[in-house]
Image (tube, rainbow, N blue to C red):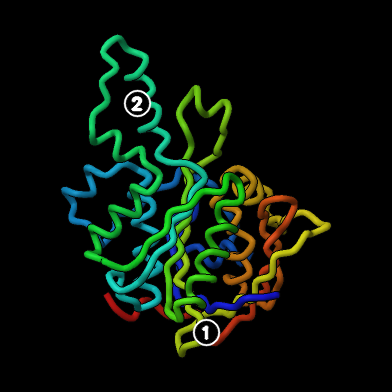
Amino acid sequence: MTIEAYIEGVGLCGPGLTGWESSRAILAGVRPYVSMPAVVPPSSLLPANEQRRMVLTVKLAMAVGSEAVFHAGRDAAATPTVFTSSGGDGDTVHQILESLATPEREVSPTRFHNSVHNAPAGYWSIATRSHEPTTALCAYDASFAAGLLDAVAQANAEDRPIALIAYDLPYPEPLNTVRPIVSLFGTALVLSPRAADHSLARLTIALRRAENESTPMPDPALEKLRRGNPAARSLPLLAALARHAAETVAVEYMGGKHLMVELAPIGSQSRSGRAA
């Protein structure tokens, strides 16, 4: 059994990857990849004073989500969302644990609500003034695949576009020792059940018990990133999209299974967002 969807827009932020448009040549292998500290750009959905108060998890999700929605020319307020991440905000969790280790054991309400897994989804709904459905899910290292499968299923069930927003960040020590994540990484896809003039590619997805491992990245540094950040399991799919090539990639799922994602490019990718 297969399920299909069409990619309309992409958002991207990671080490040496500053937005989808500027990263396409790198992912396609046309330009060399140079890893450098990731810089999360400001989101157009939030005023500057609000952005200064946001935790990094929220900033990353907002940045890639707003880029993808703009790229697709969609109205963020009218687009349902799926947020997927293998963990919450690690810095906030670390601070809460430090507070609980003190005699006072006082945790501020702000830190508590920022630690909740669906905090980025809540901030997104507030910032976009959206009343559309939103989902926040977690599936450990398979979080991107689970989010992609959920988003495509929802898009088809509701017959409307949906935004998938995936992100993961490193934990501070000592949490990093038991759950190492190499760098922050976030990506977003606007997915539609129907083709449109601005569609980038068609995805045909099947859940299979794959004999082979997940599709790797040819560049060793990008492969290290793919293996070291659950959201970066998306990199082989993004690379195929950047190459504008018909390819099938295997993305790690759960229970020894993979999502086999067949990508068929459509039209040209040389366009920017169609709406603010």
Depth check: give the residue in front, 144 or 44.
144
For the view shown, which residue lies furthest in the front direction?
157
Residue assigned mark 2:
96
Q: Mark 1 or mark 2: name the one nearer the start of the chain.
A: 2
Residue 147 drawn at (x, y percent): 53, 59
Where is 51 relative to 45, above or below? above
> From where the camera sits, is residue 31 visible?
yes
- Tag 2's secondary structure? helix
Residue 169 drawn at (x, y percent): 46, 42
Where is 270 relative to 177, above or below? below
Drawn side of residue 241 relative to residue 68, left or right? right
Drawn side of residue 243 relative to residue 194, left or right? right
Which of the 4 quarters of the picture holds residue 127? bottom left
> From where the camera sits, is residue 14 visible?
no
In the rendered image, the quadrant that contains the C terminus is bottom left
Residue in the picture at 50% in, 27% down: 175
Residue type marked 1:
Ser
Residue 156 drawn at (x, y percent): 51, 77
Drawn side of residue 85 relative to residue 132, left or right? right
Residue in the picture at 40% in, 27% down: 94
Residue in the picture at 39% in, 31% down: 93
Pointer 1 local density, CA inside 10 Å: few below 14, some 14–19, many at least 20: few
Residue 201 drawn at (x, y percent): 56, 79
Which of the 4 quarters of the picture holds residue 91? top left
Q: Are marks 1 and 2 in contact (CB under 8 Å)?
A: no
The numbered dot on residue 250 is none
In the rendered image, the quadrant that contains the N terminus is bottom right
Residue assigned mark 1:
268
Residue in the picture at 56% in, 52% down: 143
